[in-house]
Amino acid sequence: MASGLRHCPFMMLKDNLGTLKVPVIIYILGILAMAITAFGRKDLVDHTSFKLVFIGALFFIMSDSILAVNKFLVAIPGSHFLVMGTYATAQYLIVRGLLTSDQKLN
């Protein structure tokens, strides 16, 4: 296995997921689709809108990664603040980026 794959969150967590392994894989595929879609906006919208939405998608992935590590691998002190902070930042950036894009369409 490539050494980089050993450090991805799923590979670190997979042995601790039990019966949730398949649902977690499906959820990861959904998040991956979101990130790919956010990146796919690159040449379709203005740079600011693209950047805000894509960085928001990355914050969303960070939020879910912290949540998963905390639940399935090791307790992270203050994880609820980290999860909600990255989640709220993600939502703000995504909405702000979409609103920026909508304003350009008018």
Image (cartoon, grey):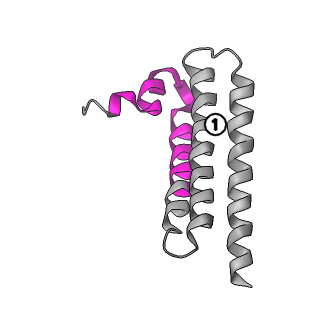
Expressed as whole percent of the image width and height from the top left, the position of residue 94 reads 68, 57
The correct choice, above or below, for 90 with respect to 15 in the image is below
Depth check: 64 or 46 in front?
Answer: 46
The answer to whether residue 105 is left or right of residue 12 is right
Query: What's the residue type where badge 1 is placed?
Result: Ser
Per the image, the residue denoted by label 1 is 63
- Left or right: 52 as drawn, with respect to 13: right
**Residue 12 figure quarter:** top left
Q: In this orientation, which residue lies closer to the viewer: 72 or 44?
A: 44
From this view, report whether residue 7 is shown above or below residue 54.
Answer: above
Pinpoint residue 17: horizontal percent, then vertical percent: 53, 25
Q: Magenta residues?
A: 5-34
Quadrant for the C terminus, please. Answer: bottom right
Comparing 45 with 79, the one in front is 45
Identified at 58% across, 74% down, the residue is 45
Taken as a whole, is the magenta stretch helix, strand or loop? helix
Residue 36 picture location, percent across and down: 49, 59
* Residue at 25% across, 34% down: 2
Residue 63 picture quarter: top right
